[in-house]
Image: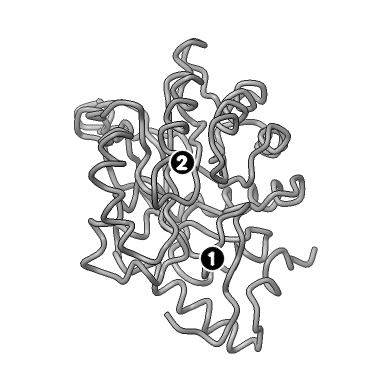
Amino acid sequence: MQSDFDLSVDIGGVKIKNPIITASGTFGYGEEYAPFLDLNALGAIVVKGLSLEPRMGNPPPRIIETASGMLNAIGLQNVGVHAFIEDKLPFLRTFDVPVIANILGDNAEDYQRIAELLNDATGLHGLEVNISCPNVSKGGIAFGSHPEMAMDVVKRVKSVTALPVIVKLTPNVTDVALIAEAVEAAGANAVSLINTITGMSIDIEKRVPHLKNIIGGLSGPAIKPVALRMVWQVANRVSIPVIGIGGIMDANDALEFLIAGATAVQIGTANFINPQASIHILKGIIAFMDRQQIRSVHDLIGTLQC
């Protein structure tokens, strides 16, 4: 997309042409959306989370619509890192758009091994580390809920990769900024937030949970105010770039996150409603900048007046 405005930003070493990124878990491996929009127009693509081995995910039902949002318990279904490198990445290399791999694991060693494998993959521009996963060796406590465990994962990943490392933070903690500071100290190049908020829904006729997994992750417009608050708090506590995620449905939503301090934003649930949502949001930001006579997106980032 040609523009007279400077929309480029640097996400901890990942240089992108505009601040619109598609979020992991909502955009497949890129090829699923290629028939609907020009992938070259995006700032970057974050692919579906990758584990060391393929995962089938949770049994259905695993998605349900809620008031202003969606609950999902997909269970991190994915093809595994080896199939991604061999079967998915070659397609993405045909586009002029940075590709970021979201990675996950059951223990810290899994993260390290996946990062090591991806470090040598041609056409990859960065890693996003999902620390919302349960640490099996620590009784299922999420890596991202404890500063020391989060730091351990980041240090292990950084030790085996030269790629920029973005850490995706969970909102299901008391102080998300504390976790952000910990991963920054461990060497993270950027943070992205928020992941989904844990929730549940009940079928009152049958008196059973709507999701087979009982609980799931809430996303969509319902979580935007929470996400915006957390992004603002983290942006004021760390020096590394912050990527805003959470219920961004249109350009106004994205602009709120940029003004709050996000260097870029990720579009998630909106992709399920409109596959071209990311492009519409980008055009809306450009229209806003034109109306406000703002030439560079950097003149918007972190300009909240309190």
Sooner in the amino-acid sequence: mark 2 or mark 1: 1
Q: Position of residue 183 (x, y in %)?
A: 66, 34
Q: Residue at x 32, y 53 (%)?
A: 27
Q: Are marks 2 and 1 in contact (CB under 8 Å)?
A: no
Classify mark 2: helix, strand or loop.
Answer: loop
Q: Position of residue 113 (x, y in %)?
A: 44, 25
From the viewer's side, name the closer residue of 170 and 220: 170
Classify mark 1: helix, strand or loop.
Answer: loop
From the viewer's side, name the closer residue of 233 and 76: 76
Q: Is residue 144 left or right of residue 72?
A: right
Q: Is residue 159 left or right of residue 115?
A: right
Q: Residue at x 48, y 51 (%)?
A: 125
Quarter of the rendering containing residue 92 = bottom left
Kindly identify which numbered label has been placed on residue 196: 2
* Quadrant placement of the C terminus: bottom right
Q: Residue at x 50, y 84 (%)?
A: 3
Q: Is residue 122 above or below residue 139?
A: below
Residue designated by label 1: 19
Quarter of the rendering containing residue 79 = top left
From the viewer's side, name the closer residue of 285 and 163: 163
Kindly identify which numbered label has been placed on residue 259: none
